[in-house]
Amino acid sequence: MSQEANHYYIPTPSTWPLTGAIAIFFMGFGAAFTVNKLPIGYVSLAIGFAILIYMLFGWFGTVAKESESGKFNKQVDSSFRWGMGWFIFTEVMFFAGFFGALYYMRVLSVPWLGEMEIAYGTSVWPEYAAGWPTAGPGITEQFTPMGAWGLPAFNTALLLTSGLTCTWAHWAIKLDKRSQLKWSLFLTIALGALFIGCQAYEYMHAYSELNLKMTSGAYGATFYMLTGFHGFHVTLGAIMLTVIYFRVLAGHFKPEHHFGFEGVSWYWHFVDVVWLGLFVFVYLL
Amino acid sequence: MAAVHHPDNELGHEHEHHGPPAGIMRWLTTTNHKDIGTLYLWFSFAMFLTGGVMALTIRSELFQPGLQIVEPEFFNQLTTLHGLVMVFGAIMPAFVGFANWQIPMMIGAPDMAFARMNNWSFWLLPPAALLLISSFFVPGGAAAGGWTLYPPLSIQMGMGMDMTIFAIHILGASSIMGSINIVTTILNMRAPGMTMMKMPLFVWTWLITAYLLLAVMPVLAGAVTMLLTDRQFGTNFFNAAGGGDPVMFQHIFWFFGHPEVYIMILPAFGIVSQIIPTFARKKLFGYSSMVYATSSIAILSFVVWAHHMFTVGMPVTAQLFFMYATMLIAIPTGVKVFNWTATMWRGSMTFEAPMLFSIGFIFLFTIGGFSGIVLAIVPVDIVLQETYYVIAHFHYVLVSGSLFGLFAGTYYWLPKWTGNMYDEGLAKTHFWCSMIFFNITFFVQHFLGLAGMPRRVPDYALQFADFNMISSIGAFGFGFSQLIFLYCIIKCIRGGPKATDEVWEGADTLEFTDLPSPAPYHSFETPPKVK
């Protein structure tokens, strides 16, 4: 490794953030128009995504180059650690919002719906049992809830194993065992991809056989939003791992200098932990 | 002078010698905390005027009873967007602008920790603002359910609501990136010797503010995402027929919303805590108690949210808990007010514009704090909920609190930023006009609220006519007073008597003691010595 930079690295002016802002401009308008079924929305959304992907390649590529050329000293590395840590904290709070909604409905508002009286003993929904899982008192379409011990349990095993292989990769990077590193990373990505596949299959199964949909009241909403956002995060994590994999193939990272990898592994463990919460509160209980 | 650059170092100096790119590219591509701070401040000022025009349209309609200027539907859009634009477009970005300019200089850092991401945080704001403002022009108009976006109204509205939701997502992403940057800068970029308990209070308050933002902006993102899926994808989070609950939105929203009000006031506390010691020429009284008070306010802010919704029908035990928890906040806030007062006690005080605004802040913010305690009392709140008393209360904390803090900070640091002294006479005129017209506008709204005038109405009963007319006159006075502020700033940027390096004789933070005026484009590439 070249001599460590003695100054905190401040990047020169860059067009990447502006490119990203333009992407977000197209995506914001595109999303608003798309959900209102205006044809221009899809175009705008597609343009936005294309620019965003171009920006991500360019921006992260620049950072990877800077990292490999030794511009980041210990203090910069430490900034990345703080930054990634706080970012994961915001993700935790995002999921906390949805877990909070699940808790609120299961423990508070659904039981209240069963006890609702207008006046003089007349109930709004006299027939409503107010148990869980429920689609609510006003939705008559029946559904079957998702069981825990089939595919979801297998998915739990998949993600936990991928957590192990990810840690294996971390040790490999630290001990400079490059071929072990490639294999363990590859395994982690494969397990992640398998998880996403199983999740997709589970959704198809839920829609076609269990009649469990986004529109299936409180249960359907929390089930799909929680598992959906988690699945989205696993997808992001898997993409990030793939980028790291190609960087490893290109010979990046050193035993003492590899926060790019480590940040992604933190993220991967985070989605792992969220899944455990999901498994317990969405599937099991 | 431990400033500017050292041409002999080998690494990281490619940008030092030729400065920023010329013209518009400087602002589009900048990674410099001072440039980005300037962008934030001008953006927030533009949004302040935009939201101000909306406010004046509202006040014009309310000048007399009856409907005369705008349609009721449009009136509702105006109140909604006025709130959103002022909160997310004016107050919050203005404080981030101050953070960008000041935090690196005050802790002796070369720049923000993530200079490129800093640029992105800013440049996400214009697309979000466009999304928000242009929603006026789509079929159905802008969101009109109030800035709090309560369902079921917000579920029923047109495309403007979706645009608002995505705008909030983008603003949230910007805030989160900005906050990660600020927290990391403060925790990791301090000059050697700048221990946590030596940090200027402005830095402390921003550290805690950024932490609050990181904790609650994602929750808001979740809340508006649920709104979006309820609107467009058939979920039933806020629909009782589907087992959801519209009140749940209020819980999630205010779990964000209450820390949010501290997000908007804590940096103002920080600014005032810098200014008062300078102009009293004494050290801040009770520095460590200020730090602890700020932290306790932040912690308490997570357990008081339901005082915004006492009338939704919650158990009495919950009402009692939230009432007492809310009143607890008066203790650390009181610590602060007494500390500021004690700092002035027997100080050799002078009353330049920053000090005037700070003293105005203490007086008026305290009034807003007191009306807050009044509103925290459940039986009183049940009477005053959704009346003009609430409007008066939060304009006392947000205008004469947050905004006066911003004015004070602007006059305090403008000489350091531009190298020129501002026109003290103009600034004092700005202060007195703002002070007088602010009170004309909002003090009478207490009476309107106590008499029972509801908020968010374009028309009202005849007995409210006189106070409404007074309030509208005050509002126009306050609005036009801000043009003095604009003129004063432009005049200061273009020239004026040269400011000394110290600027104010009592100032003791690094940007005044260790840097020239104007502060060089790159400051503290080599860390200063902190005593």
Image (cartoon, coloured by chain):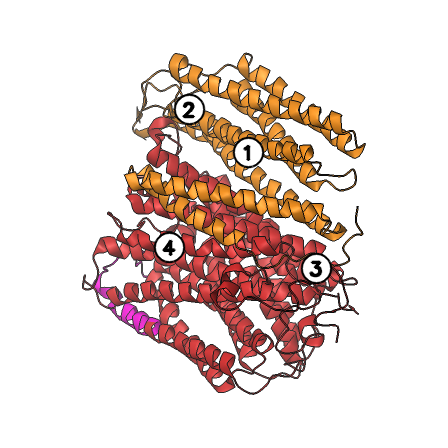
Distance CA(mark 3)–CA(mark 1):
32 Å
Of badges 4 and 3, the one in the foreground is 3
Judged left or right of residue B268, residue A164 is: right
Which chain is orange in the rendering? A
User: Which residue is denoted by mark 4 in the rendering?
Assistant: B130
Q: Circle 4 — which element? A: helix
Task: Report the chain holding disc 3.
Answer: B
Q: Circle 3 — which element? A: loop
Which corner quadrant holds the C terminus of chain B?
bottom right
Q: Nearer the viewer, residue B364 or A83?
A: A83
Residue extent of the magenta highlight: B451-475
Q: Which mark is residue B474?
A: none
Q: Circle 2 — which element? A: helix
Mark 2 in CB contact with mark 1 (< 8 angstroms): no
Magenta includes A190?
A: no
Q: Amino acid at mark 4?
A: Leu
Of badges 2 and 1, the one in the foreground is 1
Q: Quadrant of residue A203?
A: top left
Picture coordinates of residue B376, whole percent (x, y): 48, 53
Q: Amino acid at mark 3?
A: Gly
Q: Which mark is residue A236?
A: 1
Picture coordinates of residue B349, whole percent (x, y): 63, 83
Chain B display color: red
User: Which residue is denoted by mark 2 in the rendering?
Assistant: A220
Q: Amino acid at mark 2?
A: Gly
Q: Which mark is residue B12?
A: 3
